[in-house]
Image (cartoon, rainbow, N blue to C red):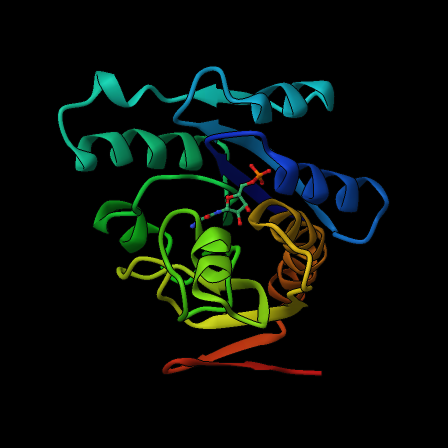
């Protein structure tokens, strides 16, 4: 059974979808630990509701990204984690984590990358006037929202959409593609070839 860690900063709806998919047997994995850089993140409460161990690693206690990530790596190793899921984790991942978990860190982003990386991607896309928005699950590398793409899903922009209504429909799709991508990883059905991720049947 694959041991997963989920890194969060906020409300944790993507964490919830991973939990739900494990509980219904779609994902053969266990969440060994949920780590947050925000002590008050609602995601932590969601994890506790399912008796999942939570750890708040307070960035204020560390003088650099390296020392912060060394602590995160220690927690991951202590929990024998093989796969790290970023789920609304609002920190840039540095070398320390990337080297220890090469091609073992996934992220979900609420836009069709490489368009609209960074913060408030749904609003960026909406304000830009796109007709099709969406979400992406990708491997994490040293570029912001930049690693090889595993899955994407489109969401059509409607005439009467607001940035918020669009973001809500994107989120519904996030909750579907993140578990799908995690399943592909767990079942060892992905091969990374440069920028391309091949899905093996
Ligand atoms: C999600 O929309 C996720 O795609 C986004 O933050 C939200 C977290 O929601 N992540 C990013 O923008 C990363 N660049 P959640 O806490 O309810 O899962």
Residue for point 24% across, 18% down: 60
Residue for point 48% across, 64% down: 138
Residue 7 percent location from the top left of the image? 48, 37
Q: Is residue 174 left or right of residue 176?
A: left
Residue for point 34% across, 37% down: 73
143 vs 106, nearest the viewer: 143
Q: Is residue 99 left or right of residue 184?
A: left
Q: Is residue 106 above or below residue 193?
A: above
Residue 200 lies in quadrant: bottom right
Q: Is residue 190 above or below residue 162?
A: below
Q: Quadrant of the C terminus?
A: bottom right
196 vs 108, nearest the viewer: 108
Residue 1 percent location from the top left of the image? 68, 48
Residue 160 lies in quadrant: bottom right
Q: Is residue 2 above or below residue 145?
A: above
Residue for point 56% across, 50% down: 163
Kindly give the residue lying farthest to the front in the view shown: 160
Kindly give the residue lying farthest to the left in the view shown: 63
């Amino acid at each position: 059974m694959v041991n997963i860690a989920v890194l969060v900063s906020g409300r944790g709806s993507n964490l919830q979808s991973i939990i739900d998919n494990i509980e219904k047997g779609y994902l053969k994995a266990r969440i060994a630990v949920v780590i947050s850089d925000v002590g008050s993140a609602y995601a932590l409460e969601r994890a506790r509701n399912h008796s999942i161990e939570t750890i708040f690693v307070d960035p204020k206690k560390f003088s650099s990204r390296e020392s912060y990530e060394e602590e995160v790596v220690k927690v991951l190793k202590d929990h024998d984690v093989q796969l790290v899921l970023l789920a609304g984790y609002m920190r840039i991942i540095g070398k320390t984590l990337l080297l220890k978990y090469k091609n073992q860190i996934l992220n979900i982003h609420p836009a069709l990358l490489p368009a609209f990386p960074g913060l408030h991607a749904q609003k960026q896309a909406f304000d830009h006037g796109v007709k099709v928005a969406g979400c992406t699950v990708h491997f994490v590398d040293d570029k912001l929202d930049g690693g090889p793409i595993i899955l994407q899903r489109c969401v059509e922009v409607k005439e009467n959409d607001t940035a918020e209504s669009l973001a809500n429909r994107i989120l519904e799709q996030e909750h579907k593609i993140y578990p799908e991508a995690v399943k592909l990883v767990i079942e060892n059905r992905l091969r990374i070839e440069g920028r391309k991720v091949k899905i093996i049947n």
